[in-house]
């Protein structure tokens, strides 16, 4: 299976686990054709990682979504920076928010810590290697 197929499978399975048959509060209160905009505002200095996954999450929920990156994976982001915005149905924005935040927080934390450790050993000639740890699911 290709990376793209694995990513789509991961997103489908994660959304199924998170919202199951639907976000019933959203379904009950917001018209299905309502559109909106969401921004990811950085709350802590970090190295951004996972924005391409975020774009795919919203594309899965709303194929007509528009993802506008202001920062790209690997960029250093300061507090208050808007990393990206998404224009999509409100249902897609609300249904994808938790998964998107979980993915970005985890991936950005790993990238930030890795950059810190790499900077610490840069002068030594050593290389930082991963231990290929995995997370269930």
Image: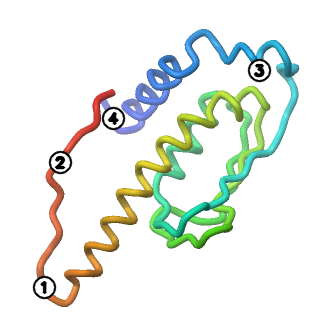
Mark 2 lies on a secondary structure that is loop
| Residue where numbered disc 1 is placed | 125
First in sequence: mark 3 or mark 4? 4
87 relative to 83 in the view: left or right? right
Q: Residue at x 26, y 75 (%)?
A: 118
The one nearer the camera, 45 or 63, is 45
Q: Which mark is residue 132?
A: 2
Q: Residue at x 44, y 57 (%)?
A: 108
Q: Nearer the viewer, mark 3 or mark 2?
A: 3
- Which color scheme did the rendering employ for the protein? rainbow
| Residue where numbered disc 4 is placed | 2
List x then y, in percent, for residue 25.
75, 17
First in sequence: mark 2 or mark 1? 1
7 relative to 91 in the view: left or right? left
| Residue where numbered disc 3 is placed | 26
Q: Residue at x 67, y 18 (%)?
A: 23
List x then y, in percent, for residue 5.
40, 30
Q: Residues within 10 Å of mark 4 (few under 14, many from 20)?
A: few
- Quadrant of the rendered image containing residue 7: top left
- Quadrant of the rendered image containing residue 96: top right
Q: CA distance from mark 3 to mark 2?
A: 38 Å
Q: Residues within 10 Å of mark 3 (few under 14, many from 20)?
A: some
Q: Residue furthest front?
A: 44
Q: CA distance from mark 1 to mark 3?
A: 53 Å
């Amino acid at each position: 299976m290709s990376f793209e197929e694995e990513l789509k499978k991961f997103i489908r399975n994660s959304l199924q686990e998170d919202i199951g048959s639907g976000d019933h509060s959203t379904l009950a209160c917001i018209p299905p054709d309502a559109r909106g905009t969401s921004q990811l505002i950085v709350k802590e200095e970090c190295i951004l990682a996972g924005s391409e996954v975020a774009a795919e999450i919203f594309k899965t929920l709303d194929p007509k979504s528009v993802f506008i990156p202001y920062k790209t994976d690997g960029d250093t982001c300061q507090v208050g920076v808007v990393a990206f915005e998404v224009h999509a149905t409100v249902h897609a924005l609300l249904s994808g928010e938790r998964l998107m935040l979980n993915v970005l927080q985890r991936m950005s934390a790993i990238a930030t810590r890795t950059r810190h450790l790499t900077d610490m050993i840069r002068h030594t000639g050593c290389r930082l290697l991963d231990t290929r740890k995995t997370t269930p699911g």
